[in-house]
Image: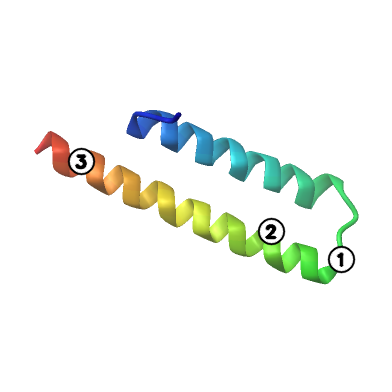
Amino acid sequence: MIETTAEKTAYLQSLIDEINNDLINKSLTDKQIAIKKQLLNNYSLAIKKLNRFRLKDLI
């Protein structure tokens, strides 16, 4: 189970890296590309939200 904000951020970043590699290295259909780009957006937003909560905890 993922416990800390840092672990959650690292996990999401690994998913982002994997999707980026797929977009670069694989032959994907337009639909697959659209889905992966939406996932990238969602994961990036999740990281931003996690970082915002972490900053609030520090203040």
Q: Residue at x 51, y 52 (%)?
A: 43
Q: Quadrant of residue 57?
A: top left
Q: Are marks 3 and 2 in contact (CB under 8 Å)?
A: no
The residue indicated by pointer 3 is 55
Q: Which residue is mark 1?
A: 29
Q: Foreground residue, 5 or 37?
A: 5
Q: x, y percentage for residue 56?
A: 16, 44
Q: Position of residue 27 (x, y in %)?
A: 90, 55
Classify the position of the N terminus by image quarter: top left
| Percent of width and height locating residue 11 | 52, 35
> Residue 2's image quarter?
top left
What residue type is disc 3 on?
Answer: Leu
Q: Is residue 21 left or right of residue 47?
A: right
- The answer to whether residue 59 is above or below residue 39 is above
The outermost residue toward the left is 59
Identify residue type, mark 1: Thr
The residue type indicated by label 2 comes to Lys
Residue identified by numbered label 2: 36
Between the residue at mark 1 and the residue at mark 2, the CA separation in whole angstroms equals: 11 Å
